[in-house]
Image (cartoon, rainbow, N blue to C red):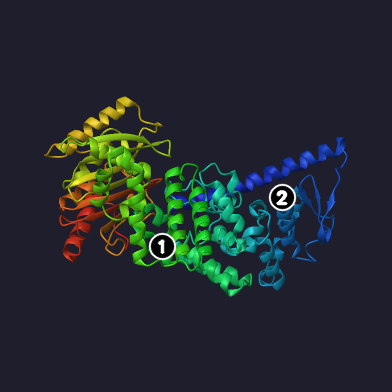
């Protein structure tokens, strides 16, 4: 049955993983015993390397002397076992692991609060060598949840949301692996992450934050807030200095902030990086927050961290770092940056398109456009605008850094419900929209960037499917009348139970120019069309959209404005919009 904020399904899977791990440990122990006995008969013992306090290293394994009271008389040796393992890049010999497990009763309250234990823990988390392997050995022996009783709450814990492919404890250890081994990662910017990790002056704080960022899961309430309280207790037991303790608590409490900002906000809006930087005290906090966020997203599942998400996160990091470097640059400086950037664009693209044509295009768009659009993107926009005859939409396909995606540049005349028509056409051709930006010029021409992913799971888009999509988009964008609905598959079933709460939020404090609508719910086919249809029915224009899918749940973000190009401030209208979205989506009770 459901218990303490956890679904019955989660409890069942937790029990399964616990039993499976016990069987795995028993099997490994028996196999190791059999191998050791057979090797004694035929091979002499290999040389050993003596370590401090009686430990020794042989065959990249940590051994202990044959002393029945080796740990009993010196309980801190239990912790030293894993410090040696980390320093030597070794695992525990089977007899060592077995002896540690047999002496876990020594890890009592006196041990946990002893100043020598605290000193050894601070030493362990500050080691120059990776510690992820040693922590896995702690988990294998049962020492980890004795040393950190808070760990028991996430051990073998499954979250029933289809996004996380691992138990919470395994996810946390994977996070630490990605933190400590950036050069082993195939994703872009690995070298840059290595440099940030190498230069981090508080590796102990960052390791603790990464290991315990989800420690609050499995309990009722906000897991970030609960986790912050738990790591505060851990930090006090470890006798961390107050400054480090406060930084650790901050990182755990806000470990979702950077990922949500990168994926749910319009990064071309300078206010986004500005608001995010306000939450940080120093550039070093940004470095640690970035590495924590990347590791967290990377360890969700093999498919979760795409190059698209990776690029968004890196873009937010660079934008925020620029703010710290310039440190509250005056508004006049930003105007200077806009003028300088426009001049560079005109100089570089003027020969290809004509200086007056380029300048006219830039003047008809918001000041943020030249600052946050790449030169290649602006070149694509100019080429499409040049070929637009005022009636027939221009549609171009371009490669995307994520091989499963394609970027569409669409130039057409603005109209209410435009985005709803675009997304309907794209979804009818079996593509999903993952990101969209509608750059509206003062003359009513809209330059749309839409990133699509094949719903059939194929990489790339062949020419025949591109042509079909072009025809569908042109038809729906140019014709008036009722928009066709996206067919729901007959085999589509209602999503199963989930511990994820659905909600709709409408905010006016995120963007200086737009009202921001955030929808979070269980994913279903036609969801994007339903939500964009409701928004269009209120006479609102969508200027930016982002769709983030995580397993069985989705977050849709819309930046909208009314017919005058202004925010929606009337409370009655906002309430009706929210209720209509909930009614159409029917995700359940909102969670505010």
* Other residues around mark 1 within 10 Å, as few (<14) / some (14–19) / many (≥20): some
Q: Is residue 339 left or right of residue 70?
A: left
330 is higher (above) or lower (below) than 99: below
In this view of the protein, which residue sits in the foreground, 25 or 83?
A: 83
In this view of the protein, which residue sits in the foreground, 109 or 511?
A: 511
Disc 1/disc 2 C-alpha distance (Å) = 38 Å
**At which x and y percent is residue 180?**
61, 52
Tell me the element at label 1: helix
Q: In this figure, which residue is indicated by the disc labeled 2?
A: 89
Task: Say which quadrant the N terminus sits in.
Answer: bottom left
549 is higher (above) or lower (below) than 368: above
468 is higher (above) or lower (below) than 55: above
Q: Residue at x 43, y 36 (%)?
A: 403
Q: Residue at x 59, y 46 (%)?
A: 183
Callout in the foreground (1, 2): 1
Q: Residue at x 48, y 53 (%)?
A: 11
**At which x and y percent is residue 551?**
41, 45
- Tell me, yes or no, if residue 319 can be seen here: yes
Q: Is residue 111 left or right of residue 531?
A: right
Q: In this figure, which residue is indicated by the disc labeled 1?
A: 276
**At which x and y percent is residue 337?**
37, 58
């Amino acid at each position: 049955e459901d218990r303490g904020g956890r679904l019955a399904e989660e409890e069942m899977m937790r029990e399964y993983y616990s039993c499976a791990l016990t069987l795995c440990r028993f099997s490994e122990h028996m196999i190791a015993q059999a191998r050791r006995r057979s090797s004694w008969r035929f091979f002499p013992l290999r040389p050993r390397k003596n370590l401090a306090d009686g430990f020794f290293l042989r065959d990249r394994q940590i051994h202990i002397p044959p002393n029945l009271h080796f740990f009993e008389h010196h309980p801190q040796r239990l912790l030293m076992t894993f410090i040696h393992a980390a320093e030597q890049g070794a695992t525990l010999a089977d007899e060592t692991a077995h002896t540690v497990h047999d002496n876990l009763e020594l890890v009592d309250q006196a041990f946990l609060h002893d100043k020598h234990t605290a000193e050894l823990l601070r030493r362990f988390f500050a080691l120059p060598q990776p510690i992820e392997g040693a922590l896995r050995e702690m988990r294998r022996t049962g020492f980890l949840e004795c040393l950190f009783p808070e760990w028991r709450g996430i051990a073998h814990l499954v979250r029933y949301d289809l996004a996380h492919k691992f138990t919470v404890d395994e996810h946390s250890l994977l996070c630490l692996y990605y933190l400590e081994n950036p050069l082993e990662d195939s994703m872009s910017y690995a070298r840059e992450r290595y440099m940030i990790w190498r230069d981090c002056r508080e590796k102990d704080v960052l390791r603790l934050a990464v290991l315990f960022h989800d420690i609050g899961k499995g309990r009722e309430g906000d897991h970030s807030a609960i986790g912050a309280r738990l790591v505060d207790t851990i930090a006090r037991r470890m006798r961390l200095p107050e400054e480090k303790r406060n930084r650790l608590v901050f990182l755990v409490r806000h470990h979702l902030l950077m990922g949500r900002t990168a994926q749910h906000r319009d990064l071309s809006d300078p206010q986004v990086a500005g608001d995010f930087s306000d939450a940080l005290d120093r550039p070093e906090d940004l470095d640690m927050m970035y590495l924590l966020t990347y590791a967290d997203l990377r360890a969700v599942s093999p498919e979760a961290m795409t190059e698209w998400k990776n690029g968004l996160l890196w873009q937010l990091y660079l934008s925020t770092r620029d703010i710290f470097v310039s440190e509250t640059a005056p508004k006049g400086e930003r105007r200077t940056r806009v003028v300088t950037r426009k001049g560079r664009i005109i100089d570089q693209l003027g020969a290809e398109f004509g200086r007056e044509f380029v300048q006219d295009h830039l003047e008809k768009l918001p000041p943020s456009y030249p600052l946050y659009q790449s030169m290649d993107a602006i070149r694509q926009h100019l080429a499409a605008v040049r070929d637009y005859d005022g009636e027939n939409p221009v549609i171009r396909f371009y490669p995307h850094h994520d091989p499963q995606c394609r970027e569409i540049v669409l130039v057409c005349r603005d109209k209410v419900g435009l985005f709803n028509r675009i997304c309907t056409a794209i979804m009818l051709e079996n593509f999903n929209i993952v990101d969209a930006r509608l750059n509206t010029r003062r003359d009513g021409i809209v330059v749309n960037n839409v990133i699509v992913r094949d719903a059939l799971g194929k990489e790339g888009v062949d020419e025949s499917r591109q042509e079909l999509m072009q025809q569908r988009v042109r038809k729906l964008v140019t014709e008036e009348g009722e928009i066709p609905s996206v067919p729901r598959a007959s085999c589509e079933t209602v999503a199963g139970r989930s511990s994820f709460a659905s909600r709709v939020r409408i905010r006016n404090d995120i963007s200086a120019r737009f009202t921001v609508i955030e929808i979070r719910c269980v994913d279903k086919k036609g969801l994007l069309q339903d939500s964009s249809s409701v928004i269009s029915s209120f006479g609102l224009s969508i200027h930016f959209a982002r769709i983030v899918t995580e397993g069985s749940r989705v977050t849709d973000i819309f930046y909208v404005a009314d017919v005058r190009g202004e925010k929606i401030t009337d409370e009655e209208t906002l309430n009706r919009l929210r209720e209509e979205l909930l009614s159409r989506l029917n995700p359940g009770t909102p969670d505010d």
